[in-house]
Image (cartoon, helix red, strand yellow):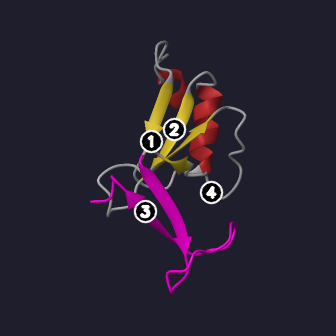
Amino acid sequence: TVEESAPALPVLRKLVVTGETLPPDLCTRWFARYPGIDVVNAYGPTECSDDVTHATLTPGTETRHAHIPIGTAVRNTRLYVLDEDLRPLPVGVRGELFVAGTGVG
């Protein structure tokens, strides 16, 4: 099986993933196999030159939800959720994510 052939990874402290949306079941399987290795979920839209958010996930992080959090802004980056008229929205209201700071390409 895959679990039997997975390496031990004795010196790895964190796994950083970026790119596509992180599937919750992948986190669940990772922590079942590697409970001592945190996962850093990094997010960065195409318009930016690098990742703009990081969320550190641990074995205690809830991963049964439909979406894994993308975290908070990295250094020298600001995030805004705006409506169609580019007005800031309150926390919890859906809108478009805008990124400002040194990472914007």
Q: Position of residue 101 (x, y in %)?
A: 38, 56
Q: Which residue is mark 1?
A: 17
Mark 3 belongs to which amino acid? Answer: Val
Task: Identify the mark nearer the N-term, 3 or 4.
Answer: 4
Q: Which residue is mark 4?
A: 67
Element at badge 1? strand
Q: Is residue 94 magenta?
A: yes
Mark 4 belongs to which amino acid? Answer: His
Task: Identify the mark nearer the N-term, 1 or 4.
Answer: 1
Q: Describe residue 61's horizontal placement relative to residue 12 as left or right.
A: right
Q: State the predominant SS element of the stretch in magenta.
A: loop
Task: Identify the mark nearer the N-term, 2 or 3.
Answer: 2
Residue in front for this viewpoint, 20 or 73: 73
Q: Describe residue 73's horizontal placement relative to residue 57 as left or right.
A: left
Q: Which residue is mark 2?
A: 40
Tell me the number on the disc at residue 99.
Answer: 3
Residue extending furthest toward the bottom: 85
2 and 4 marks in contact (CB < 8 Å): no
User: How many residues crowd around disc 2 within 10 Å: few (fewer than 14), some, or many (20 or more)?
Assistant: some
Question: For the magenta stretch, what is the residue range?
Answer: 76-105
- Residue at 50% across, 21% down: 13
Q: Position of residue 14 (x, y in %)?
A: 50, 27
From the image, which quarter does the C terminus lie in? bottom left
